[in-house]
């Protein structure tokens, strides 16, 4: 089992349009902090690498079916590394 699957299995919540996500640049930083590639995240969430890339550069947002899982993954990474899930407003 890969690192990302271990973090996501079992999922704790259902999909939600309201699941909070960090700002796009923070999403990429958290993923890299865990040593994950966009492809690993994409495979775990059942989306394309291009979708993850667009979420990380702010060109698109995840749909309801994966948003909660993606948010949970990023939250777990932040907790594991003792860093904030998101930055205060106005910081990037």
Image: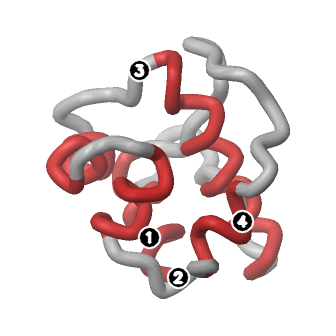
- Residue 14: percent from left, percent from top: 73, 22
Label 2 neighbourhood size at 10 Å, few (<14), some (14-19), many (20+)?
Answer: few
Q: CA distance from mark 3 to mark 2?
A: 24 Å
Q: Quadrant of the C terminus?
A: bottom left
The residue that disc 1 covers is: 29
The image quarter containing residue 75 is bottom right
The residue that disc 2 covers is: 33
Above-or-below relation of 77 to 11: below
The residue that disc 4 covers is: 7
The residue that disc 3 covers is: 63
Secondary structure of residue under mark 4: helix
Q: Outermost residue toward the bottom?
A: 35
Label 4 neighbourhood size at 10 Å, few (<14), some (14-19), many (20+)?
Answer: some
Q: Residue at x 34, y 28 (%)?
A: 61
Q: CA distance from mark 4 to mark 2?
A: 14 Å
- Residue 54: percent from left, percent from top: 20, 43
Left or right: 84, with 53 as reference point: right
Q: Nearer the viewer, mark 3 or mark 2?
A: 3
Left or right: 54, with 67 as reference point: left
Q: Nearer the viewer, mark 1 or mark 3?
A: 3
Count of numbered circles on the image: 4
Specify which label sits upstream in the sequence, 3 or 2.
Answer: 2
Specify which label sits upstream in the sequence, 4 or 2.
Answer: 4
CB-based contact (under 8 Å), mark 4 and mark 1: no
């Amino acid at each position: 089992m890969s690192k990302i699957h271990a973090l996501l299995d079992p999922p704790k919540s259902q999909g939600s349009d309201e699941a909070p996500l960090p700002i796009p640049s923070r999403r990429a930083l958290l993923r890299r902090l865990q040593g994950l590639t966009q492809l690993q995240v994409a495979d775990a969430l059942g989306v394309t690498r291009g979708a993850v890339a667009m979420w990380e550069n702010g060109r698109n947002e995840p749909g309801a079916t994966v948003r909660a899982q993606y948010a949970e993954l990023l939250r777990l990474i932040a907790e594991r590394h003792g860093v904030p899930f998101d930055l205060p407003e106005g910081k990037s």
